[in-house]
Image: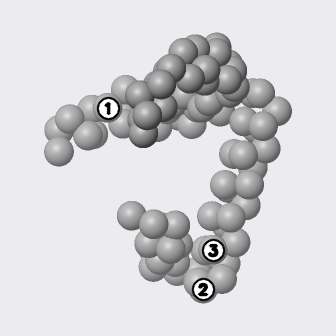
Amino acid sequence: MTKEDIVNRIWEELDLNKKEAADIIDQLLTNMKMVLKDGEKLKIGGFGVFEVRERKPRMGRNPKTGEPAEIKAGQTIKFKPGKTLRNAVSEG
């Protein structure tokens, strides 16, 4: 599913025009990015929790040469699905 698919579903289900649906999705995603960029947890009830985690430097390998290579420290985003989402997926 793509962003455009989501916009189309919102457009059809909420009886909005396509531009309004796209604006809603864009604003939602922008706000989610801003919250995570500020280092805050993003909790969406019934869906899950997104949070920024620090990643320590570690040794890895260059996939082409097999040579050891240091992977720098950085930040990554972790997602933990909520119980409602886990149950919905497992029930099919």
Residue 35's x, y, as percent? 76, 38
Numbered label attached to residue 86: 1
Q: Is residue 55 above or below residue 17?
A: above
Say which element carries label 2.
loop
Q: Residues within 10 Å of mark 1 (few under 14, many from 20)?
A: some
In the picture of the structure, the residue carrying the numbered disc 2 is 17
Q: Is residue 54 above or below residue 82?
A: above
Which quadrant is the N terminus positioned in?
bottom left
- Residue at image location 64% in from the left, 15% down from the top: 57
Residue 64's x, y, as percent? 42, 39
Q: Is residue 28 above or below residue 23?
A: above
Q: Residues within 10 Å of mark 2 (few under 14, many from 20)?
A: few
Say which element carries label 3.
helix
Say which element carries label 1.
helix
In the picture of the structure, the residue carrying the numbered disc 3 is 22
The amino acid marked with disc number 2 is Asn
Q: Nearer the viewer, mark 2 or mark 3?
A: 3
Q: Nearer the viewer, mark 2 or mark 1?
A: 1
Q: Earlier in the sequence, mark 1 or mark 3?
A: 3
How did the renderer colour the structure?
Answer: one colour
The amino acid marked with disc number 3 is Ala
* CA–CA distance in space, label 1 to label 3: 27 Å
Residue 18's x, y, as percent? 59, 84
Residue 4's x, y, as percent? 50, 74
Q: Quadrant of residue 56?
A: top right
Q: Earlier in the sequence, mark 2 or mark 1?
A: 2
Numbered label attached to residue 29: none
Q: Quadrant of residue 26?
A: bottom right
Residue 12 visible to an observer of this rendering: yes
In this view, the residue farthest toward the left is 92
- Residue at image location 69% in from the left, 45% down from the top: 32
The amino acid marked with disc number 1 is Arg
